[in-house]
Each structure stands twice: as C-alpha cells, then as structure tokens.
C-alpha cells in the first residue's frame, strides 16, 4: 500500500511537509522531481502534517512533485559484495558497480546491552610510539583525532588504517573534499587494503542531508561484519562536518538551538554513533577512529567538547605530531599492564620529564640562565621529540620502550627520573 | 486506578503529544503502543486535553493515532530485598536478565521485574499483631548479603496502622503478603516484602537530619587528609575530560568506608561502565571478605541510551540509596556525570520549546541540581540508629571551565570541592585534584592545624615557582628555593598516588596519619645546602626513597628499612626544627 501524495504543503531548505495519514516516525519516502528521484526521511509528525528531510536537498522541488511513502526506515544492503565498493549517503553506488539491494538491514539500530559487553582487552599495534607506548589503541575503542584544519589528519587516519591489524575497514567520509576522497581510495588501493574496505562517502558538494546518513550506514554495516566474527575498524572523517549538517537541518526546522546553534541533542546524537564501538564476547569487534576538526583550535567548541566526553580518549594532532598533553587513551590500562613490566612507569615517567622540559623551554624563551638541570631537560626534550614524537617513526612497542630508557640514560642519572628503584635496576641501560 | 486513554497527535524526537480523555497527572507514566510493543514514557507537560510525554525509548515507528495507556502512577522503583548486586538501567530494568531475554542488543519495550520474584527470603518478624505502626517502621527482617534488611511499612502509607496479621518466621517471596495492616477506618492493607516508591519524591521517614561530622574515608590521601568528605555530606569532582574523574570514582567506589555503594552512570561511556560491571564481582570487599558486588548497585545508562532514561537515572539511584539509609546503613552514591544529566534536562527543555537560560540550560537548572544534592544527608531514624547518604557527583564542564552553569550550581550546594586540573593531569600528577583550588568544609582524619601547616608549603612553594618564572631560578634565594622543593616533595610523595600500584592505590587512615607525621617533620626541618643544585639532588634522592617507601607493604621489613633510610637521609642535612612548627609537631 504505497500511497502517493502530490500536494507538498511547504518547502524550507531541504525540509518539505505533506498532509498524510498513517505515516510512521523515521520512515522513508521517495520524492520525484524533474531532477530525478530522491529519498526523504520523516522527522516530525504533527496531526496530519508530515515533515520530511529530502536527501537531495530542497532545490528545484516543486509543490506539484509527488511523494511516495515506502513504509520502512532507511536501510542498507549487507553482503560480502560490499567489499571494495563506494557508496553515497543515500546508499547508491559512487563507483561504476551495480546498485545492491539484497539483504537490506535497518540503520541506526539499538545499542548493545552493557551487560553483554566484555572488557576491552587487546591492543591494536600501530608502530607509532606516541600511540603504542603512550596512548595505546585498544580493540573496540572509540577515539577521535582532534585536529585543526590543515593538519595531516586524514594521512594519519589512513596510516593507522594501513598498519592496524584488522579484517575489515569501513570509511565513512562526511563533507570530504573530493581530493581527500581520492587520497583515501588511492592509499588503500596502493596498500592493498581496498579489497577489505567499504566506503560510504559524502563529499562537500553533495546534499547536506546525505551527510547525516554516513555514520549510521557505516556502523550498521560494521555491526553486521562484527557479528560475523570480523574485527572491523571504522574511520569517520570528519565528525565536525556531520555535526554542522545536523545544525543546518535543525535550524531550518526551527528547533530551539542550544550551544552555538547546535541542536540540544548534539551529545545524544554523537553518542549513539560512537557507542556502536564494541567487542562482542562471541563475535568480532568494532573500533572507531574519527576525525574531529576543532574550529579555531578551540577544544571547548561544542563538537570536540561533547565528543571528548563520549569517546575513550583522543589523539591531539598539532604541528604534525600527536601531542603528549591532552592525548589520552582511556583504555590503555586494560592492555599496558600485560605488555612489559616497565610500560606504565616509563610512559608516565617520560611524560613527567617532558612536561618539565616544556617549563624549561618557557624559562629559556624568557632569557633566564639555564641551570645544569635545565640543560639536561633541554637535551631530553629534543631527543624525545625527534625519536619518539615524529610520526614517521615506525617501530614495535618493545623497541620503543628500549629507546625510552636509552633516551633517559643519555640525559639523566637514575634518581632524577622519579622511577622506582626496582625498575631502574632492571631496565636502566648498562654502560660497558 | 483511573482508566485514561489517549492517542498520539504529534511526534518530535523522543517527545510525543497525546490527546487524552479523563484525568492525567504530571510525571505520570504512560505507555505508547506501537507495533505490539508498549514504550514507557513520562508526562512532562499538560495543556488542555493534550499531554506531552517524553518517551524513554527510541521513537522510530510511532504513528499519529497510536494508542497511549496511562498508568495512574508516577515513575517509581520497586524496593525490597534483592537490590544489592543488581545492574539496572535508569528505569530499574535489570540489564543482565534483559540480555538473557533479548540478547546483545537492547530491544525496546521490554520491561522486566526489578527484583527476582521467585527467590525466597528468610523472614523473621519483629512486630506482632496489635502493634501500632507508621510508615517506615520495621515489621521484620531478612538477611541480605552481609546486612540485615529491614522489611518496613511502605513509605507511602501515611497515618497510623494496627497490625492485624503478620507471618511467622519462614521463607517468603518478595510479592508474598507478610503482614496485614488496618488503618483508622478499618480498611485492611496487605504488605509484601517489597513496595514501590516514586523516584522524584525524597524519602523522608526519619526523625531528624543531622550535621555530617564523621569523615568518609576514601583511602585517597589528598582527599582524606586535605579535602575530606563527611558521611552524609556532598561533594563534587569537576574536571575536563581526561583529567581522571572516572578513575577517581572507581577507586572511591572500591575503598570508601561505607556499607553500600550505588554507582549511577548517567550517559557514560559503555567501555568504562563495562569495566565496573565485570570487575566488581571479581573483587573482594576488604571489610567483609565477600564480593564487592554484594554491597553495590549499579545504575547504568550509557551515553547512547535514550535521553529520558538518562534523566531518570540519578533519581532511581538516589531513591535506592535513601531506601537503604532507612535501615541505618551508610550509603555512598556516585553520580557520573551530573553534567550529562543536566544536559539531558537541557535536551528535554529544548524539545518543550522552553525559553532557554544560561548556555541554553533550562531556567530551573539550579533548583533541580540543589534539590538532588539535598537528598544526601546524615539522619537519625525513629529507632535512634543513624544512617547516611553521601552524594559525590562528577561534573564535566566544557574545556574544564568551572564558570559554567552546572559547575556553579553544584558548587553552591556541596560541602567539598575536588577540582581536577588539566595542568596536573598533563604532567601525570594523579589524582589530578588541584591542591590550591580545592576545598572542603568537612573535618578530616588529621587535625586541621597540621594540615594547614603542610598545605602552607604547597601554597608558598607554588608562589616561589611563579616567582621563578619571572625572576628565574638564579634570582631566587636558596631559602625560597628550599620552600619550593619542600612543596614539590609534598606533592610528589603525598598528593600524588599511584592508582595502579597494589600498595599505594589505597592507603589506610592509620598509614596516612603515620606517613603524614614523617612528612610534617621533613617540612618543618631546617636544612643546609651549599647551593640549589645540591638541594635539588638531595631532594631527588629523598623523593626516590619515599616513593619506594610508599610502595612497600605497611609495617613490612622493607617498610621499616626504607623508613630508616629516609630518617638517616634527613639526619644528614637537618639542623633542627623550625621553631614555629614545634606546636604542630607536638
């Protein structure tokens, strides 16, 4: 029973209203316009007035166009055939492949019962010391990369994707520059990862509403792979674009805006996506790495701020490096107690000293005389930045730990490090 | 019960507008019938014949014309034996049982009994037929974990009743009638082991509310010694994300010196919640030797659960806390995080299209926060015993800015403030409670003048540090420099605590007092050094020994020998004690 309505009552931006009955909240409709057919989603009901968000946007829609309700919410096809394919925010192919219609699954499904979750327990090795040693990435973790525009965040994302040991990679691109989309495609192709990758891409020139579908489609597909026992890494870039799309739509719909014009449910909206990260006891897992660009490098901006409270840590990308301050993996303690006895102590000890180095740097900049201690710190900070922080360093964790001790021993005496004696006697490099 | 029916006329997010016929009360629970399921919701506004309900579930699939059933009851929890050890969502749905029924995902519209209905409890009556009783009076007891659970006259039975029958000692299920009460008009009211209480109404069946005085020991040195919390008091832990709120809460939940701990996660990360969920049953309560879970209730709402359920969760938690307080027990409620809860309020207010207040929070934000914290308290019950609810709430202000409305509203009503700082957590100084910004109005485990003396070094040390930033180390006198080193020493070996070290993670009040005595002596000592380099390296040496000492088992051989080493290291340089400190040291 697909009723067709051909009287559109109002058109505001990408939101149209029609008079219709028996329509369910969240259902899909098709709108036929002279430019073709677009999907639309019911996002408000008031008596017989139904508001719909038209995926292709409102431009060119006529009050005489027809609206056909499909009687089901947004769905995406799921099968092995997805591998290596690229889709748009409305689920249609971006590549030259065929449209997929088999085994449709509803997107934006319910959360996992916390009682059914298992404690995250496996480390994802990346070969990047600032991650492996200092802020270990853990299976099922949800982590954003906080970054200013212009930083190589997509490069970092791609690099982690290439080096991380996972079965399936799902890339959700939101408001991506076309060049960035091609960059991801090329990088994954060159690295031989394209065949285990599914891409859902909304580019900056596509209709705003389609942007909103990207995370849900990516995560619904990821969930199915995870339930089949696969370890899935979902890359979402850029979540700030996603939030901005939400802002745009909610303001058009005359919702009372909350902080800086974002909708009041920004936190809930972001959370329901990030919370899809999970490690199933008897199946696979979903790990989410997202990019959150910070307008004006402002971490108190609503998007990074809300994100920080949802995610299990964050990597701050600044001046092309992962900053030791502010970067955090909340789940690291689940795994770094099992790696090597010195991992935790070394991680904290080195950062404490790096923090002291920063103070010295400040003193130096103000022209104070450097003491012997200051000189040691300056030497240390320089070595730390070059040998640990540089993103091109690619070494296994154990090598990074050894390197940490080498750096400290070349600058300090053991008791200057603040590390416990038993660790020092075991790990302090012996001089011949 | 009134049979009020309604039909949906509008849907907007998780709010539905319903035209009703009959009487509907504010905060009444209604069920929206959709696709063979009933979705729980709460009435949050009534205008004419339209009521607006916030649905506690995802609203997808609701249609104009769907039927709504009103329950006649406010949102309530069931209280009775069997609450301890449970893991609930904000609406008191037991999550593990839900998982057994619906699998990995949370299916909407499934509501289970909060308490096991088939479990038998060994009831012993303490009242007898003919006794006159009032609400909250004890009818009998059942053993629950390590506690004697009082079976009380339901709190909603106002007035005086006469016991007309009461069951003899034996095994009963929670819904079995264990007594019958006759009211003044002669009506008989059956009473079971459990009853319901509306979560948004404070439980007030006590004789008198008292001033909280006894410290609630958390085994975190910085808290117990410097910024203590009292049993029955309130405190808040604001801090930016990543400053260590969650770890601090976890430590407190394990070691706090109370009978029962209730953890309320209102919109938190599932990855962290699951840690608590899975670890607690494995941990042993040092006080009882039983599983820690047996004295814990977890109210768990992850950030992706519907906003209305999150809004309800703190009320569910505090109601359960008050219920156990009625038994003369000391209960700690940890709410993580109250900002998420306030945000849920903001979200609902936006949906209602209310005129927003500061930062778009509703105008009633302050009064709502105040009345929540006011549900804490130390009380004397009618039988003379004392019970308490201590409330500790974390606050997550944007960017760690304490000027924002939720932090400010909270600061007005709490007795202690543990402000976490980004600066300290960046430098890996944990717990990152800022020793200069934080405060407490409660009494701690160590006399106030001793604490003040030690704290003085922190303050002056920090002043010297600031000064050095202006005039440089070379422009600072050796004496000032030593004050700075002393402050830094106090910070590194006492304020900071290694939560991953088996010994250092939780320090008994006895050991705190003992160690504090040693530190006090060091702070009060007059040391002589040739220059700053020598002073610094000597303090480095002392710090090293003290850190090893902190990690050694209390009163072990290693502990004793390290203490000797510390003493002799101090003796090397000490030239007596500062005169002004003699009184403090005595």
Image (spheres, coloured by chain):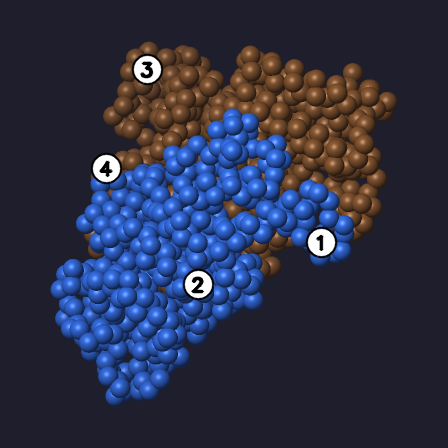
Label 3 resides on the chain identified as B
| Alpha carbon distance from label 2 to label 4 | 42 Å
* Picture residue at 42% right of the left edge, 13% below the top: B127
Asked if residue A383 shows in the view, the reply is: yes
Q: Position of residue B279 (x, y in %)?
A: 38, 31
Looking at the rendered structure, whether the residues under marks 3 and 4 are on a common chain is answered as: yes
The numbered mark, 2 or 1, whose residue comes first in the sequence reads 2
Q: How many marks?
A: 4
Residue on which the image places disc 2: A153
Instruction: Look at chain A in the picture and name its colour.
Output: blue
Looking at the rendered structure, whether the residues under marks 2 and 3 are on a common chain is answered as: no
Where residue B100 is drawn, which disc sits there?
4
Q: Position of residue A225 (x, y in %)?
A: 22, 53
* Picture residue at 56% right of the left edge, 58% below the top: A300
Label 1 resides on the chain identified as A
- Quarter of the image that includes the C terminus of chain B: top right
């Amino acid at each position: 029973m697909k009723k067709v309505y051909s009287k559109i009552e109002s058109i505001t931006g990408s939101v149209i209203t029609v008079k219709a009955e028996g329509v369910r909240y969240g259902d899909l409709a098709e709108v036929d316009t002279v430019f073709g057919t677009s999907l639309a989603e019911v996002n408000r009901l008031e008596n017989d007035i139904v508001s719909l968000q038209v995926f292709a946007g409102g431009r060119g829609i006529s009050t005489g166009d027809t609206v056909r309700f499909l009687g089901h919410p947004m769905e995406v096809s799921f099968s092995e055939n997805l591998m290596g394919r690229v889709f748009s925010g409305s689920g249609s192919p971006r590549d030259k492949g065929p449209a997929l219609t088999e085994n449709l699954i509803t997107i934006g499904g319910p959360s996992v019962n916390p009682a059914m979750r298992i404690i995250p327990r496996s480390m994802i090795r990346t070969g990047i010391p600032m991650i492996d040693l200092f802020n270990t990435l853990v299976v099922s973790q949800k982590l954003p990369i906080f970054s200013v525009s212009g930083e190589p965040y997509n490069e970092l994302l791609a690099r982690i994707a290439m080096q991380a040991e996972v079965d399936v990679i799902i890339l959700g691109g939101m408001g991506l520059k076309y060049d960035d989309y091609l960059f991801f495609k090329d990088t994954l192709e060159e690295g031989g990862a394209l065949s285990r990758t599914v891409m859902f891409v909304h580019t900056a020139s596509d209709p705003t509403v389609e942007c909103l579908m990207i995370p849900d489609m990516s995560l619904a597909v990821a969930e199915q792979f995870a339930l089949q026992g696969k370890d899935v890494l979902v890359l979402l870039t850029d979540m700030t674009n996603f939030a901005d799309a939400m802002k745009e739509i909610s303001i058009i719909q005359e919702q009372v805006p909350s902080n800086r014009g974002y909708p009041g449910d920004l936190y809930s909206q972001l959370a329901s996506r990030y919370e899809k990260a999970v490690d199933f006891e008897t199946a696979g897992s979903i790990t989410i790495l997202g990019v959150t660009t910070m307008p004006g490098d402002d971490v108190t901006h609503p998007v990074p701020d809300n994100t920080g409270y949802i995610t299990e840590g964050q990597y701050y990308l600044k001046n092309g490096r992962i900053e030791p301050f502010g970067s955090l993996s909340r789940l690291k303690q689940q795994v770094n107690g099992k790696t090597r006895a010195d991992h935790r102590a070394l991680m904290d000890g080195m950062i404490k000293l790096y923090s002291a180095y920063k103070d010295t740097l400040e003193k130096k900049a103000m022209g104070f005389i450097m003491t012997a201690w200051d000189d040691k710190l300056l030497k240390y900070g320089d070595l730390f930045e070059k040998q640990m922080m540089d993103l091109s360093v690619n070494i296994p964790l154990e090598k990074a730990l050894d390197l940490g001790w080498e750096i400290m021993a070349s600058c300090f005496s053991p008791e200057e490090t603040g590390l416990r004696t038993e660790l020092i006697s075991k790990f302090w490099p012996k001089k011949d | 019960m009134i049979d009020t029916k309604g039909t949906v006329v509008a849907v907007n997010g998780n709010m539905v507008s319903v035209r009703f016929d009959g009487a509907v009360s504010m905060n009444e629970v209604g069920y929206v019938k959709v696709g063979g399921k009933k979705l729980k919701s709460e009435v949050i506004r009534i205008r004419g014949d339209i009521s607006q309900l916030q649905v506690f579930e995802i609203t997808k699939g609701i249609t104009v014309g769907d039927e709504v059933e009103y329950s006649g009851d406010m949102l309530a929890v069931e209280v009775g034996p069997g609450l301890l050890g449970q893991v609930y969502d904000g609406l008191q749905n037991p999550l593990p049982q839900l998982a057994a029924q619906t699998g990995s995902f949370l299916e909407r519209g499934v509501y289970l009994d909060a308490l096991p209905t088939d479990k038998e409890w060994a009831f012993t009556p303490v009242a007898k037929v003919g006794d006159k009783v009032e609400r909250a009076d004890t009818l009998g007891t059942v053993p629950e974990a390590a506690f004697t659970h009082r079976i009380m006259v339901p709190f909603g039975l106002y007035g005086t009743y006469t016991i007309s029958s009461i069951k003899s000692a034996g095994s009963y299920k929670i819904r079995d009638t264990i007594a019958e009460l006759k009211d003044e008009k002669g009506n008989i009211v059956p009473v079971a082991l459990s009853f319901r209480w509306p979560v948004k109404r404070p439980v007030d069946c006590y004789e008198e509310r008292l001033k909280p005085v006894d410290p609630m020991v958390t085994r975190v040195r910085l808290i117990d010694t410097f910024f203590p919390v009292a049993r029955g008091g309130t405190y808040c832990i604001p801090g930016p994300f990543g400053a260590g709120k969650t770890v601090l809460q976890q430590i407190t939940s394990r070691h706090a010196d109370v009978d029962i701990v209730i953890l309320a996660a209102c919109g938190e990360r599932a990855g962290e919640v699951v840690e608590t969920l899975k670890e607690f049953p494995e941990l042993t309560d040092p006080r009882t030797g039983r599983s820690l879970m047996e004295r814990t209730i977890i109210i768990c709402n992850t950030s992706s659960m519907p906003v209305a359920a999150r809004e309800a969760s703190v009320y569910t938690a505090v109601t359960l806390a008050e219920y156990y307080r009625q038994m003369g027990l000391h209960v700690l409620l940890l709410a993580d995080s109250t900002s998420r809860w306030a945000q849920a309020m903001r979200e609902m207010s936006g949906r209602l299209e209310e005129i927003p207040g500061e930062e778009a929070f509703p105008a009633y934000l302050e009064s709502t926060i105040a009345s929540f914290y006011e549900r804490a308290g130390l009380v004397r019950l009618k039988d003379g015993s004392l019970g308490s609810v201590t409330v500790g709430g974390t606050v997550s202000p944007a960017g760690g800015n304490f000027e924002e409305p939720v932090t400010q509203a909270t600061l007005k009503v709490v007795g202690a403030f543990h402000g976490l700082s980004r600066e300290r957590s960046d430098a890996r100084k944990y717990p990152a409670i800022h020793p200069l910004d934080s405060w407490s109005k409660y009494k701690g485990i160590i006399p106030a003048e001793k604490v003040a003396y030690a704290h003085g070094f922190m303050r002056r040390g920090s002043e010297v540090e600031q000064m050095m930033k202006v005039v440089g180390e070379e422009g600072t006198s050796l004496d000032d420099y030593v004050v700075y080193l002393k402050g830094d020493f106090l910070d590194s070996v006492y304020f900071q605590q290694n939560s991953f070290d088996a010994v250092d993670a939780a320090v008994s009040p006895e050991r705190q007092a003992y160690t504090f005595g040693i530190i006090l002596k060091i702070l009060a000592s007059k040391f002589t050094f040739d220059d700053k380099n020598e002073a610094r390296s000597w303090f480095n040496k002392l710090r090293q020994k003290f850190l090893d000492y902190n990690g050694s088992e209390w009163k072990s051989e290693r502990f004793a020998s390290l203490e000797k080493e510390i003493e002799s290291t101090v003796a090397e340089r000490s030239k007596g004690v500062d005169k002004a400190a003699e009184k403090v040291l005595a």
